[in-house]
Amino acid sequence: MPSLKNRFFIKKISRSTSKKLLDKYHYLHKEGNFRSGINFGLFEIETKLLIGVCVFHTVSAKEIVKGCFGINSYKLEGFMELGRLCMNPHKHEKNLTSFFLSGSINLLKKIQTVVALLTYADSEHHTGYIYQACNFKYYGLTDPKKDFFILQKDGTYKKLQRGKCKHLIGEWRDKSRKHRYLIIYDKKLKTIWEEQPYPKTEQKSPFNFNKTDKEEQIYLPPETAQLTLL
């Protein structure tokens, strides 16, 4: 069989194209919105089908810079976060996800200053074996937190996305903790987080996927930027 490099290619894609695959297969699809930035798609050369999506953006909170490196955020440019990684499970094969993630990171570094790259694996859904395979270092679980859920008129609950919960009727629920993975490219940077051994637990599927689901056919959009994996 031809190599992965001869059967797949990576291109920069729009938020709307990314959303099509994320809404179908990512485990956080019910949250609806996601933060976009620099997005890459993995395409099959023969069919031009979209197989995977990587979404990179600046870190989600300025406090993370202080907590990770002990410096103020305005003093550090190029600290990026991998916010979404999703593959079409119908097209899954050995080493394809690591090929895509590694290739996307290489392309990101060609068009954007990247001094460090942070990503998380939601412990409720998976452990992050793909990040281990791509040589991210592991820095334990995030601190325990809670989310506030607002009671709806029909008796269901909806998570409060932003703002204060004072005077709202609802309840606090434990938030799933996340595994923290980090790669530092700027050797002058030193994290104050303590590196830990990789977690080894039962692997859960990080996909919103049922074997009876019909495969979503998403093709290469004609306006896609001409960035390919070399």
Image (tube, rainbow, N blue to C red):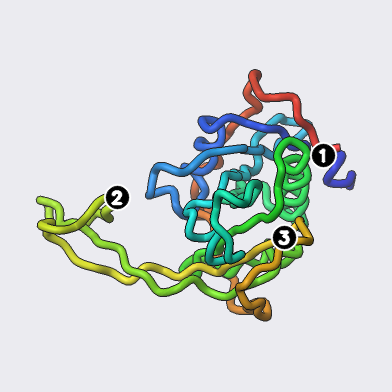
- Disc nearer the start of the sequence (1/3): 1
> Which circle marks residue 184 in the picture?
3
Residue type at mark 3 is: Ile
**Between disc 1 and disc 2, whose residue precedes?**
1
Q: Position of residue 62 (x, y in %)?
A: 49, 54
Picture coordinates of residue 219, whole percent (x, y): 63, 28
Q: Which mark is residue 162?
A: 2
Q: CA distance from mark 1 to mark 3?
A: 30 Å
- The residue furthest top is 222
- Of residues 110 and 154, the one drawn nearer to the viewer in this rendering: 110
Q: Residue at x 48, y 59 (%)?
A: 63
Examine the image and state in which quarter residue 196 appears: bottom right
The residue to which callout 1 is attached is 7
Rendered view: 52 above or below 189: above
Q: Position of residue 49 (x, y in %)?
A: 67, 33
Q: Please provide percent x and percent y for residue 200.
A: 64, 79
Question: Crowding at label 3, few (<14), some or many (≥20) Cα neighbours within 10 Å?
Answer: some
Q: Label 1 amino acid?
A: Arg
Q: Secondary structure at mark 2?
A: loop
